[in-house]
Amino acid sequence: MRYVHAVVALRQGKIRAIVMDEMPARRFLNDVEGLAIMEEVLSEESYAIGFRKGNTELVNAVNKALNELKADGTLDKIFEKYYASFLEGDDSLSVKPEDIDLNKGAKGGTLVVGTEAGFAPYELRVGNGFIGIDIEMCAAIARKLGKELVIMNMNFDALPTAVSTGKVDMICAGITVTDERKENMDFSDNYVVGAKQVAVVRADDYEK
């Protein structure tokens, strides 16, 4: 998982800080004692879905579906659902993988998404399945396209290669849009704008 080893190293004093998205950072603070978030926001980023370079047909189809989900309020509801529970440490909302409609058996074939399921609330492994903002968003997109969503969990660093070689159709894992990444893959329209990047430190260090 993307930040687990870094959190261990931080708690052991091997590193001084972790720069990460504020939302997962807040969740880490709920689960791990002795950490703090510095008040200053370091930067703001945008997240989008990544595709093989030149796969214009799929990019356009996903953008159409994504914009429909924005317009009808579905995307907002997905965000609100997870922000209200995961980020506040309220586990009363027990989201189960089997409750997410992956459109299994769809006549339009499959839509294979690569992700790294360790970046709550965007993607998280629960038992043998997956939940999270990105998972539910991709499932809704797949339904719009008449396809079954297939989820492939892998290391974050392996995602660009997986999509460029056709192992997956797209990648979605809280992926920041950068000029460097644009050289090697295409992106959908942003589905997160202004994601705050903060520094997570040991509480003892922050209080000094």
Image: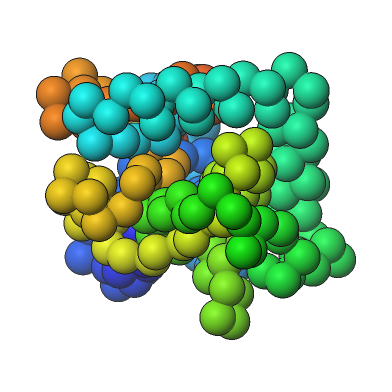
Among all residues in the image, which is located at the extreme front? 107
Observer able to see residue 205: no
| Residue nearest the observer in this picture, 72 or 25 | 72
Name the residue at 31% across, 53% down.
Answer: 168
**Where is residue 198 shown, x and y percent of the image?**
43, 36
Name the residue at 61% across, 44% down.
Answer: 146
Q: Is residue 113 above or below residue 174?
A: below
Observer able to see residue 25: yes
Left or right: 34, with 59 as reference point? right
**Where is residue 68 shown, x and y percent of the image?**
68, 22
Name the residue at 62% across, 64% down.
Answer: 105
Among all residues in the image, which is located at the extreme bottom? 127
Left or right: 167, with 31 as reference point? left
Q: Is residue 15 above or below residue 40?
A: below
Left or right: 85, with 145 as reference point? right
Count of numbered marks: 0
Quarter of the image for residue 152 reads bottom left
Name the residue at 25% across, 57% down.
Answer: 167
Left or right: 36, with 66 as reference point? left
